[in-house]
Each structure stands twice: as structure tokens, then as C-alpha cells.
Image (cartoon, grey):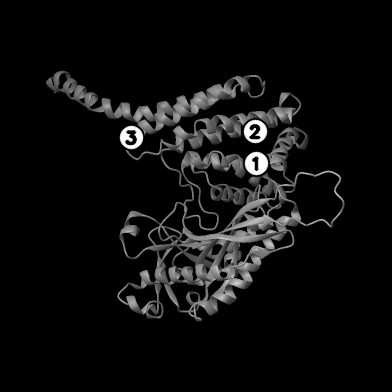
């Protein structure tokens, strides 16, 4: 009931209001947004066309990322856009076919000679990459021209620090390029008055703002009829918006060694619309989990995995009435926990694509993290009038979890070693999680509702010990068992036949 959920709701709201909201006033946030949007959506397309001598033009600038989804936390310091290349988005400009992995496509430029006459021997697939990289080069040069002078707003100005090609992780030829700007607050000079005493000048606010730009091409949904599953082709949002193809490859070994690299199909525009329509309850829960998982990001639980879980949960809840924010948080964590157990999280728009990409070096730690957080928040929900009614005390437990994990983060990051055997990987992850629990156990035991969590988590680890060791035990003992059975049959059974 609503009364039973109140203690958990208050905790989630407290975390959200104290740690997730922007630390700048709304008018300054809007000022930064207006300057960035004006630069990328209006000034860049016009000058780019002239700079590239009409070889390239931008058909559309698509909003992407958490800021435009209204789920950005702490500071308005990241803006994401997709730049749709008009010349690659026209009818018959490219041909696509099934890629190496679900959700990817091989892309062939129909008239490669238009893009690079000096390298006409390159394959049509490679020409697609060349075309987008050349487009990116023109974008970088155009931005340098546009930002030769700072952009001025009502409350501050944006000054260019640099524009770089980068990836996540960094790659020499990445599908993403980042414009880095410095926002400096404009100090309004007060009219001259007689000063009776000298006041210390207030510190100017400065923020580093990163603008990620991703070049892409756009195709209507019917172009993907032989590539995407039927359920995807029936999605109303995708029917309206179509899909985009970006330079990012599937990164499989066969694809990386081949000239025919397949490219990622993006559903960003439709995804943005879905996120904007979310009820504020889901956005608060999502932002809270983003803040929480940011401290354990070494485990590779990125925001896209959380977002996918949010979209699944909110779609099931749609039309079922109001949902408390604490219950929304628990539902999202339940999906993430199930994904950690199965190592599967289907894409929201394309269920044939698995977005749960966690390294084997961290899969047990991620599973234990989800189980622990789910137990913690569920127990707080079950004890609305007891010790868990104290929001400050509950927040202390959350901070202790973050502090304890961060104190072991350096050792955890060194566990990602491909040379380790499965047993060594499990042993390292299990021991490290037990170290975290050992740090938290005294505090958890002071809460009556949370006192049993350390014991329950130790049982989870112990259960996995049996699951990991039993196949190894069978593998080691099976030859001896077979040998013993053969001797028994030879000595005691066959003589009587």
C-alpha cells in the first residue's frame, strides 16, 4: 500500500533531490542549452554546406542522450546529437543487408566514386566509412570557424577548448566526436557606489560542457524488412521515424578482420520520444539508479542497460494507475537482477539484440550487487514504522555501500584479466564481495530489518561456490568413476555371464 511504501519513497526522493537535481538554477541551465542547440542545430548545418562546397549537408539534427530525455543528473555538462548526412540518406544512395549480429547491417554505397575518387579501389562497404569520416572532418573544421569567438548567452558564455575524435573506449577512428566547451558565468557589474568595506569577490562558476556528435544516415523502416524482426517492423514509433545507421561496428572477430564491417542500427529518435513520455515517477527512479550505479561503473552496468529496464517496466505498467517511486525502483532492479542471472537483456526495440554485455570478470559481482540492493530496498519497504522509517539512517547505509565498494574499486578493476580461469574469476569476485559485506555488516546489524542481509548474501556466494565447483568435481572424478565401474564389471559381472 501507499503507507507501507512511504519510507522507501522518502529515501528515493531524498537521494534524488540531494544528489540528482541540477546544481545550477533553471535559467542558467536553459541558457547553456539554448547556446548549444543554436550552435549545433542552426549555425552548423548552414556553414557546413558552404565549407564542404555543397558536398555534404545535414538533413536533420536528432536529439540524443540523457539531457534531452530529461534524465541528466547533477550538471548540464553533456549534450548528444546525431547528424543525419543528407547525401547518404537519399533514396538508392546506399544498400543494406543483414549484418554479422542482430541489430547490425552491412552498408554498401551505391555510387562510391562520388565520395573519394582518389581511392576508387576501396570496397563499397569501406566507402561508407570513408564518407562519414570525411563528413566528420568537415564538421570539426566548421565548428572551429564558428567558435573562433565565444558564444554569449544571458548568464554566461561558451568558449571552445577543443574538438576530438573519440570513442567509448577511445579508438583512432571513432563513430563519435566530442566538442569540449567551457561555460563561464558572466559577472554583472554593479553600478558605482561608495564602498564602506571591501567584500571578497564571489567565485565565477565554470563548467566543462561536452557535446557528442555522431554522424549517421537515415532510412525508412521498410528498408530494414529483411534485417529487423517482425515485432520491430510493427512498432508505431519506428514506422513513423524510421531508423538510423551509425559507424559503430559489431566488433566481432569476423567483422573486425573483414573489409565488410557491419554497422549498428540505431532507434534513438523513437527511444527519445518514449523516454520523454515517461511518467515523472519512472524518471526519478531512473535518475536515482544512475547516481547509484555511477560509483560502481567499473562493473559495466551502464546507463543504457538501466534505461532498457526502465522502458520494459514502464510499458508493462502503462494504464495501471499511479505507482509509488519506491516500487518503480524495485521493479527496475528486479529486471536488472534477472538479467544478471541469465546474462540476457533483450533490446527494447529489437529483442534479438542482447544489450547485457558484462565481462565474465564481473558477472558474479554484478549479480551480487543487484541481489544486495534489491534486498536492501525491499526490507526498507517492509519496515515503514520501524528503524527504516528514519530516512537519514537509510541514507547512511546507501552511502556506506558506495564507500565500501569504492574502497575496493582499484582491486576490482584489476580483475578484468582474460588469462584467468573461470574458477579464478569466481574466486576473486566472491572474495571481493565478501570483503564489501564485511565492511557493511556492523552497520546493517544495527538495523533490525536489515540485520539478516549479510548472512543471506554469504549464502548466495556459498550457493555459487557449489555451482562452480560441482562441474569441476565431476570433471575430475568422472575418469576414476568410469575406471572403477569397468573394473567392477570385469571382476564381478562378466564372469557370471
- Earlier in the chain: of badge 2 and badge 3, it is 2
Q: CA distance from mark 1 to mark 3?
A: 35 Å
Q: CA distance from mark 2 to mark 3?
A: 34 Å
Q: Are marks 2 and 1 in contact (CB under 8 Å)?
A: yes
Circle 3: element type: loop
| Residue shown at 57% from the left, 41% from the top | 293
Q: Are marks 1 and 3 in contact (CB under 8 Å)?
A: no
- Residue 213: tell me if it is visible: yes
- Does 481 appear above or below 216? above
Q: Which quadrant of the structure image shows residue 117?
A: bottom left
Q: Is residue 1 left or right of residue 54?
A: right
Tell me the residue that label 1 is attached to: 329
Q: Position of residue 282 (x, y in %)?
A: 67, 48
Circle 1 Cα neighbour tier, 10 Å, few/some/many (<14 / 14–19 / ≥20): many
Circle 2 Cα neighbour tier, 10 Å, few/some/many (<14 / 14–19 / ≥20): many
Q: Is residue 155 left or right of residue 416?
A: right
- Earlier in the chain: of badge 1 and badge 3, it is 1
Circle 1: element type: helix
Tell me the residue that label 2 is attached to: 377
- Earlier in the chain: of badge 2 and badge 1, it is 1
Q: Are marks 2 and 3 in contact (CB under 8 Å)?
A: no
Residue 421 image label: 3
Amino acid at each position: 500500500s501507499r503507507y507501507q511504501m512511504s519510507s522507501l519513497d522518502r529515501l528515493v526522493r531524498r537521494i534524488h533531490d540531494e544528489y540528482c537535481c541540477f546544481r545550477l538554477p533553471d535559467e542558467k541551465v536553459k541558457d547553456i542549452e539554448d547556446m548549444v542547440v543554436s550552435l549545433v542545430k542552426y549555425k552548423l548545418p548552414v556553414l557546413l554546406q558552404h565549407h564542404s562546397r555543397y558536398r555534404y549537408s545535414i538533413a536533420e539534427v536528432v536529439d540524443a542522450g540523457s539531457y534531452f530525455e530529461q534524465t541528466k543528473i547533477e550538471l548540464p555538462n553533456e549534450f548528444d546529437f546525431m547528424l543525419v548526412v543528407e547525401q547518404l540518406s537519399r533514396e538508392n544512395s546506399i544498400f543494406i543487408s543483414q549484418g554479422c549480429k542482430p541489430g547490425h547491417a552491412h552498408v554498401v554505397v551505391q555510387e562510391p566514386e562520388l565520395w573519394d575518387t582518389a581511392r576508387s579501389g576501396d570496397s563499397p562497404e569501406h566507402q561508407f566509412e570513408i564518407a562519414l569520416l570525411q563528413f566528420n572532418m568537415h564538421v570539426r573544421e566548421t565548428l572551429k570557424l564558428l567558435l573562433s569567438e565565444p558564444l554569449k548567452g544571458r548568464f554566461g558564455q561558451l568558449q571552445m577548448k577543443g574538438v576530438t575524435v573519440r570513442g567509448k573506449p577511445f579508438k583512432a577512428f571513432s563513430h563519435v566526436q566530442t566538442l569540449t566547451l567551457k561555460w563561464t558565468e558572466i559577472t554583472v557589474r554593479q553600478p558605482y557606489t561608495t564602498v564602506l568595506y571591501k567584500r571578497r569577490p564571489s567565485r565565477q562558476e565554470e563548467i566543462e560542457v561536452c557535446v557528442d556528435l555522431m554522424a549517421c544516415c537515415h532510412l525508412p523502416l521498410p528498408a530494414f524488412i529483411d534485417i529487423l524482426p517482425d515485432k520491430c517492423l510493427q512498432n508505431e514509433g519506428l514506422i513513423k521515424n524510421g531508423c538510423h545507421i551509425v559507424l559503430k561496428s559489431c566488433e566481432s572477430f569476423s567483422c573486425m578482420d573483414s573489409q565488410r564491417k557491419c554497422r549498428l542500427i540505431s532507434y534513438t529518435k523513437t527511444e527519445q520520444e518514449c523516454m520523454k513520455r515517461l511518467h515523472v515517477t519512472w524518471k526519478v527512479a531512473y535518475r536515482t539508479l544512475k547516481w547509484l550505479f555511477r560509483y560502481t561503473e567499473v562493473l559495466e552496468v551502464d546507463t543504457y542497460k538501466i534505461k532498457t529496464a526502465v522502458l520494459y517496466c514502464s510499458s508493462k505498467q502503462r494504464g495501471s494507475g499511479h505507482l509509488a517511486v519506491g516500487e518503480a525502483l524495485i521493479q527496475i532492479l528486479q529486471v536488472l537482477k534477472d538479467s544478471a542471472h541469465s546474462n540476457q537483456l533483450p533490446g527494447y526495440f529489437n529483442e534479438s539484440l542482447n544489450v547485457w554485455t558484462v565481462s565474465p570478470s564481473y558477472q558474479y559481482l554484478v549479480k551480487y550487487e543487484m541481489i544486495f540492493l534489491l534486498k536492501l530496498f525491499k526490507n526498507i519497504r517492509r519496515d515503514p514504522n520501524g528503524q527504516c522509517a528514519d530516512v537519514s539512517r537509510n541514507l547512511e547505509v546507501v552511502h556506506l555501500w558506495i564507500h565500501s565498494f569504492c574502497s575496493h574499486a582499484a582491486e576490482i578493476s584489476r580483475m578484468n584479466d582474460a588469462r584467468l580461469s573461470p574458477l579464478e574469476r569466481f574466486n576473486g569476485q566472491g572474495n571481493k564481495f565478501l570483503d564489501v559485506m564485511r565492511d557493511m555488516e556492523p552497520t546493517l546489524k544495527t538495523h533490525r530489518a536489515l540485520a539478516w542481509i549479510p548472512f543471506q548474501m554469504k549464502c548466495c556466494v556459498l550457493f555459487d561456490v557449489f555451482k562452480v565447483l560441482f562441474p569441476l568435481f565431476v570433471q575430475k572424478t568422472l575418469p576414476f568413476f568410469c575406471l572403477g565401474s569397468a573394473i567392477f564389471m570385469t571382476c564381478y559381472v562378466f564372469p557370471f555371464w
